[in-house]
Amino acid sequence: MKFPAFTTQNNHIRQLGINHNCWYVVARSNEVKTQPLNVTLWNQPIVIYRDNTGKIHALEDRCPHRQVKLSHGQIKGNLIECAYHGWRFNELGECAEVDYLAENQKLPNCKIRSFSVKEQDGLIWLFPGDESQAEQVILLGLPEWEHLNYIATVSVINCQAHYSFLIENLMDMYHGHLHQDLQAWANPILHDLDEDEHRVDAYYQAQSYYKIDKIWSVSQLFFPALRRLHPEPLNVSYVYPHWVSTLGNDFKIYCLLCPVSVTETKAYLIHFTSLNAFDNLHKLPVWFRRSIKNSLFGAAQKLLDGLVRQDVLMIEEEQQAYLQNPELKSYELNRALVSVQRLMRSQVEKGIRNEN
Ligand code: FES
Ligand SMILES: [Fe+2]
């Protein structure tokens, strides 16, 4: 069956909002230490902090007294204290203590917004939508994060571009052309596509350079001369608003989004190398397996950072070209991108329906 080339409708998709009723990733766990952290999710400044028990909370990053950022402040017990006059707020965003309150004065009734937030799989997940729906919405977990058979590598994407450019890059595996020198994958062919109201799954057949089947084969990650091209299925999925991919049985990558604004996107790229091919691994003591997992953390760092650098350059140029001439038509051959754009639009519409 032949599919015609089609033109993409830049002008709408690059201005698209987000569906707020989803769990977004706003930080890594280890970014939130004792100091409050400022993050921005779709134009909303948010302060993330740990109380004295280590529990994570998220509030609008704004002191209601004089509208400065609460993230300049510090944590006192289970309260966050503003740097300016020292007003303190609880995790619901209510003013709980003011040291200079006179005897005849009451605490000001000035509540700021709090957000549902969870710490899971080394990440901080935040739900910016309707609080009452947060628990019903599934959070895309990373079971490999704690699993002893998976080696993780993390790279952070910061790009000055609308999130649609990033997702389209990630769903179009024909862009392997850009990464030829990094030997990530080769010769992709899209052979199947599924979509529903939550996700798009694109199934490619491709070739991989790596095969993790013998203990020594882990060294392929470090030595290019040991690599041999061989066929592997390459599956990529847009599980709104995030992305996940598998290359054969050995590799899995997540891209977890934090859309910052209509022209800026942050994302956490988390790569896992599987050691499942080693049948006897489970016979080793857990402390030993954990030490292997920990000592190999970041094994794919050079590859991942290289991919990110090359992709960000292209994605930011696409954004610039769009801003300079929004009417310019683009041409597309990959039918997965039609589905991807359709999902983005329908999710945003769904979010708007939920707000009304
Ligand atoms: S501005 Fe925050 S306490 Fe005054
Ligand atoms: Fe890429």
Image (cartoon, helix red, strand yellow):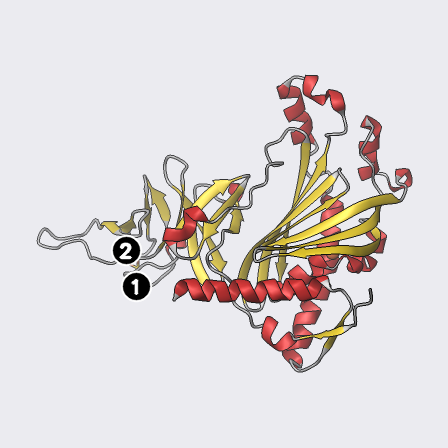
Residue at image point 75% right, 55% down: 192
Which of marks 1 and 2 precedes in the sequence? 1
Residue 231: image location, x then y, percent: 86, 45
Left or right side of 181 for 281: left
Local SS, label 2: loop
Residue 105 placement (x, y as % from top left): 12, 55
Q: Is residue 328 left or right of residue 206?
A: left
Q: Is mark 2 within 8 Å of ligand 1?
A: yes
**Ligand 2, image quadrant it occupies:** bottom right
Q: Amino acid at mark 2?
A: His
Q: Amino acid at mark 1?
A: Arg
Can residue 109 be seen here? The reply is yes
Badge 1 local density, few (<14 within 10 Å), some, or many (20+)? few
Examine the rendering and report whether any part of residue 59 can be seen. Answer: no
In the image, is 118 to the left or to the right of 157?
left
Q: Is mark 1 within 8 Å of ligand 1?
A: yes
> Quick check: marks 2 and 1 in contact, CB under 8 Å?
yes
Q: Quadrant of the N terminus?
A: bottom right
Quarter residue 319 falls in: bottom right
Q: What's the CA distance linking mark 2 and mark 1?
A: 9 Å
Q: Which residue is mark 2?
A: 85
Instruction: Look at the numbered disc 1 and give the secondary structure of its residue.
Output: loop
Where residue 66 is drawn, which disc sits there?
1
